[in-house]
Image (cartoon, helix red, strand yellow):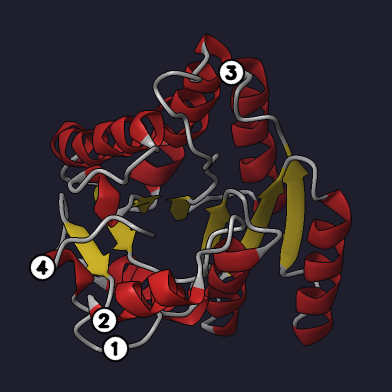
Amino acid sequence: MQEQTKVALITGAARRIGKQTATTLHAHGYNVVIHCNHSTTAAEELVDSLNQIRQGSAKYVRANLTNMTDVKSMAESAVSCFGRLDVLVNNASSFYPTDIDQATEQQWDDLFATNLKAPFFLSKALKSQLEANNGCIINMVDIHADRPLLEYPIYCMAKAGLVMQTKSLSRELAPKIRVNGVAPGVILWHENELSESDKESVVNEISLKRLGSPKDIADAILFLCHADYVTGQILAVDGGRSIHGGEKA
């Protein structure tokens, strides 16, 4: 009997790291389900380009990850795309500063929903499907879950929660589902660009003396998809920056 093609669902996959992750997994033989919320045009373009490489190998689903009804519906749609699911990559994330004097309850709800609540309930909804295929969950964490980033307290707290979710679910879902996390360092400069001197300062804190790339993160995710004896781990992909500290990016 011919082995079935494995399927990966990547949230927030229309752009940036999510897009590179989908492209990398697809290049290694996976069928991919691209999740987006507002970026439907970009998702459609990515699906079209991947299907030109291998016909019928990519589809997309749309959902607002702050809405748990949407999350549950998306889980069902994702499985129905190819009739199975082997990998869940919880990549989607809201990210913006929340100075304590200006922070709002709405910001708290949004940052915790996208970074912590949605990954949990999506994992819950896909548990039986992932168990059936001895699948894995990979969560996009952040080196700042451990070393807080100045002016981003809510985001950092949510990511710290995702670290514990990763470790907790690795026990709860064992032995059939592995759960790991990837903690990127500085991959792309923030939209609120730093000054050139601050950028230089950040790069000087990185052991490898250069920014990472989305491909570095996607390659780490691919590794964890295939690392059958690794679970409950957070893999820092940061060029060594986490051993230096720093807080500008």
Residue 44's label in the rendered image is none
Q: Which numbered disc, 2 or 1, marks the residue closer to the eye?
A: 2
Q: CA distance from mark 3 to mark 4?
A: 37 Å
Horizontal and vertical percent for residue 235? 22, 64
Residue depicted at x 66% and y 33%: 74
Q: Which numbered disc, 2 or 4, marks the residue closer to the eye?
A: 2
Q: Quadrant of residue 123?
A: top left
Badge 3 marks a residue whose secondary structure is helix
Q: Which numbered disc, 3 or 2, marks the residue closer to the eye?
A: 2
Horizontal and vertical percent for residue 85? 52, 51
Residue behind mark 2: 204
Q: CA distance from mark 2 to mark 1?
A: 6 Å
Residue 68's label in the rendered image is 3
Badge 4 marks a residue whose secondary structure is helix
Residue type highlighted by circle 2? Asn
The answer to whether residue 123 of the structure is visible from this angle is: no
